[in-house]
Image (tube, helix red, strand yellow):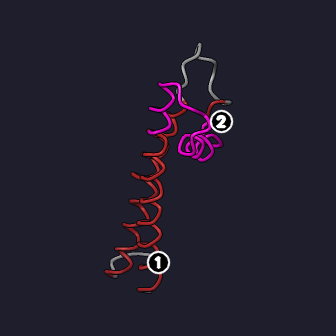
Amino acid sequence: MFVAANFLIAVGKILDLILTIYMYVIIARALISWVNPDPYNPIVNFLYRITEPVLYQVRKRLPAMGGLDLSPLIVLLVILFLQKFVVISLLDQGYKMKLGTGGFP
């Protein structure tokens, strides 16, 4: 049972790290959008390639806001929700299984 517990804990920690890194990438993309960046810059190109698929999906579901792009804010809120709900639930379940106070039957 400890293997499953360690697996859940590892998945929770890795997911938390990935979500945190992606949150910083979204913030960097939002900050770069305030200036007129060179689209051929490799860093700008990387930020656009890694964030545009997610931001596009959110943008097409949001109503028109008159040029105001709230998609990064929505994505950040979703990331925070996932960190506070999914990641913490995985870690709690893993630690409960490890201590033997709960877990899967």
Mark 1: which secondary structure?
Answer: helix
Residue 98, relative to residue 70: is it above or below? Answer: below
On the image, which quarter does residue 27 sit in? top left
Asked if marks 2 and 1 touch (Cβ < 8 Å), the reply is no
Residue sitting at x 49%, y 79%: 105
Q: Position of residue 41 (x, y in %)?
A: 57, 40
Front-lying residue, 76 or 105: 76
- Look at mark 2 in the image and give the residue it sits on: 56
Specify whether residue 24 is painted magenta.
no
Residue sitting at x 38%, y 59%: 88
* Mark 2, other Cα within 10 Å: few <14 / some 14–19 / many ≥20: few
On the image, which quarter does residue 49 sit in? top right
Residue sitting at x 34%, y 74%: 95
The amino acid at mark 1 is Phe
Q: Which residues are magenta?
A: 28-57
On the image, which quarter does residue 17 sit in? bottom left
- Cα separation, mark 2 vs mark 1, equals 33 Å
Residue sitting at x 44%, y 32%: 31
Res. 100 mark = none
Residue 24, relative to residue 3: is it above or below? Answer: above
Q: Main secondary structure of the magenta part?
A: helix
Quadrant (top left/top right/bottom left/bottom right) for the N terminus: bottom left
Res. 7 mark = 1
Q: Position of residue 79 (x, y in %)?
A: 47, 46
Mark 2: which secondary structure?
Answer: helix
Q: Closer to the camera: disc 2 or disc 1? A: 2
